[in-house]
Amino acid sequence: MRVTAVGCSGSFPGPASSASCYLVQTEVAGRTWSVALDLGNGALGPLQCHLDPRILDAVILSHLHPDHCLDLCGLHVLYSYTPPPRRAGRLPVHAPPGAAQRLARAYGVNAPEPMDDWFAFTDLSDATPFQVGPFTITPYRVNHPVEAYGLRVEADSAVLAYTGDTDICDNLSPLCTGADLMLADCAFVDGRDDIRDIHLSGSRAAQAAVNAGGVRRLMLTHMPSWNDPQVCRAQAATVWPGEVELCRVGMTYPLP
């Protein structure tokens, strides 16, 4: 299993990266399976540098803020109007309840315009795993102002834990326990962002990893362009006993 950071900018596209999108892939019997975790604004462009979006096996949306879901509208345009050969069948989209209606509002101008012709929406449910080919994906409800999920992805005896957008909460432990890689929200900075129940800071991300136990790599992501990544790393390093990594757009990380 491997994960590619298609976009890792927090809250909106930054000068060097689109908003959130992580491409998770693995090979089974000569066939590559590809799943996108989130498809935030700006992500569809760089995603095409890594694969033809027509061959995606699924998209999983952690929540319905624009920086995590909005480029599904562009993907619908690609599926609808690209010259043949077009995609065979509808793309599975696993997302919080209401995703089909929310994205229809985003896509339509004068009225909501459903996208069910190309997307098959399925609701995420807390701690209820589902399969996409060789991937076992378990969503965990996390601590954000809207219904949001962290995503635990397992394949090839490896575990990726993607927190999505969250502050500290109990579900971060089952989400992240034993993860080979924990992709952790780090939109907030200690001493600057005092509001709670929205995002993690570096130190709170590190504490969540320590509390979960067995996390092998901690990688900070979802930083808005006004964050200094080295400050975030330093704050995490006060808690995390190993190396604190920073997610780099365009990089592919093998697991384990």
Image (cartoon, rainbow, N blue to C red):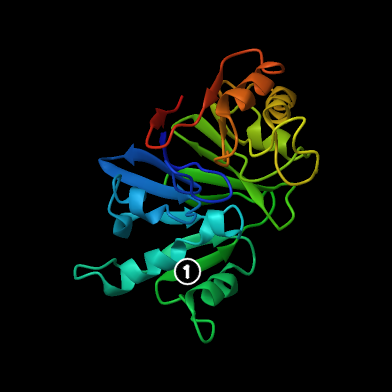
The residue pinned by badge 1 equals: 120
- Above-or-below relation of 110 to 155: below
On screen, residue 170 versus residue 48, left or right, reads right
Dot 1: within a 10 Å radius of its alpha carbon, few (fewer than 14), some, or many (20 or more) residues? Answer: some
Name the residue: 30% across, 60% down: 54
- Above-or-below relation of 125 to 169: below
Q: Position of residue 61 (x, y in %)?
A: 55, 55
Residue flagged by tag 1: what amino acid is it?
Answer: Ala
Name the residue: 59% across, 39% down: 226
On screen, residue 55 versus residue 125, left or right, reads left
The answer to which quarter of the image holds residue 75 is bottom left
Name the residue: 68% across, 25% down: 206
- Above-or-below relation of 145 to 237: below
Q: Where is residue 15 in the image (x, y as percent from the top left)?
A: 44, 43
| Total marks in image | 1
112 or 148, which lies in front? 112
59 or 18, which lies in front? 18
- Residue at the far top: name it: 241
On screen, residue 146 versus residue 81, left or right, reads right
On screen, residue 201 versus residue 28, left or right, reads right
> Quadrant of the image for the N terminus?
top left
Q: Where is residue 212 in the image (x, y as percent from the top left)?
A: 71, 27
Q: Position of residue 166 (x, y in %)?
A: 70, 44
236 or 3, which lies in front? 236
Name the residue: 64% across, 21% down: 214
- Which SS class for mark 1? strand
